[in-house]
Image (cartoon, grey):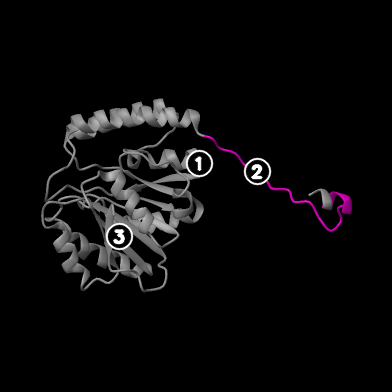
């Protein structure tokens, strides 16, 4: 098995699912779960899918401990470290709700933004958070702006903040998009490619107070550019069509034709 899940669902289908990929975030697990409990419980029936991407620290054991007192928490354990796109897809596949939210596990995304994302999803297939005042080091902010500009030029799309980790989608549209390593960086574009409507809403962004970033500026830029070329290729070759299956009224059809069929 490529991964395994703990605590099979027994409650009715939730109103929304939240997917949180985690890799070596032991210093953030408790604070993350505390904040999610505080923010999400008033919003309705929900589940949190914490996807452990082959962590080598105490991330998984801490999640299992918190699951005992947080029944909405479901844990998906990948057999090995497979990358953020794979972790996100594993969460999408396990999500039981028609609405799927997502955020990073480093606490830089603010779950208090989920009410506005849920509201925007009433009129859209996807909602992407645009970080207005980023709390990253200046070199990361500048490189992100440059990468975003290049991305929009090459993809023919316009997304204010493609690297934002906080988003929401209708599960139906997620089932239609192509999957590949690096896809998590292009979810708004991919949803638009299959005919979905995507809007952006301003969201809060916070400093990372614990743990370490998993990507450096250099390797992030290289991977993003490589994946962007793949998206450009895919967009030019994607097959999309609409059709209607017309069925003959067989009761009025001639008997001879009936026999021929």
What residue range appears in magenta? 239-258
| Residue 162 seen anywhere in this rendered image of the structure | no
Name the residue that disc number 3 marks.
Answer: 49
Mark pair 2, 1: CA separation: 15 Å
Q: Is residue 51 left or right of residue 139?
A: right
Name the residue that disc number 2 marks.
Answer: 243
Please identify the dominant SS of the magenta region.
Answer: loop
x, y percent for residue 234: 44, 31
Q: Is residue 69 above or below residue 40?
A: below
Mark pair 2, 3: CA separation: 36 Å
The residue that appears at 40% across and 32% down in the rendered structure is 231
Q: Is residue 197 above or below residue 68?
A: above
| Residue 76 seen anywhere in this rendered image of the structure | yes
x, y percent for residue 198: 46, 44
x, y percent for residue 170: 45, 54
Q: Is residue 89 magenta?
A: no
User: Mark number for residue 206?
Assistant: none
Q: Quadrant of residue 1?
A: bottom left
Q: Earlier in the sequence, mark 2 or mark 1?
A: 1
């Amino acid at each position: 098995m490529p991964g395994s899940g703990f605590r099979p669902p027994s409650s009715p289908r939730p109103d929304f699912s939240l997917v949180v990929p985690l890799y070596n975030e032991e210093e953030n697990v408790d604070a993350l779960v505390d904040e999610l409990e505080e923010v999400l419980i008033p919003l309705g029936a929900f589940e949190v899918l914490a996807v452990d991407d082959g962590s080598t620290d105490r991330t998984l054991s801490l999640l299992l401990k918190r699951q005992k007192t947080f029944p909405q928490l479901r844990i998906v354990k990948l057999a090995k470290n497979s990358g953020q796109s794979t972790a996100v897809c594993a969460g999408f596949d396990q999500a039981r709700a028609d609405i799927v939210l997502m955020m990073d596990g480093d606490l830089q995304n603010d779950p208090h933004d989920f009410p506005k994302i849920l509201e925007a999803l009433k009129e859209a297939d996807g909602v992407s958070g645009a970080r207005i005042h980023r709390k990253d080091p200046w070199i990361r902010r500048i490189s992100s702006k440059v990468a975003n500009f290049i991305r929009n030029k090459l993809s023919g799309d316009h997304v204010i903040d493609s690297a934002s980790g906080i988003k929401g989608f209708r599960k139906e549209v997620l089932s239609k998009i192509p999957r590949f390593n690096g896809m998590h960086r292009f979810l708004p574009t991919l949803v638009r490619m299959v005919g979905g409507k995507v809007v952006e809403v301003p969201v809060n962004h916070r400093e990372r107070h614990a743990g370490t970033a998993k990507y450096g500026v250099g390797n992030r830029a290289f991977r993003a550019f490589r994946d962007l070329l793949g998206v450009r290729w895919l967009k030019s070759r994607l097959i999309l069509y609409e059709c209607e299956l017309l069925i003959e009224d067989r009761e009025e059809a001639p008997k001879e034709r009936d026999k021929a069929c």
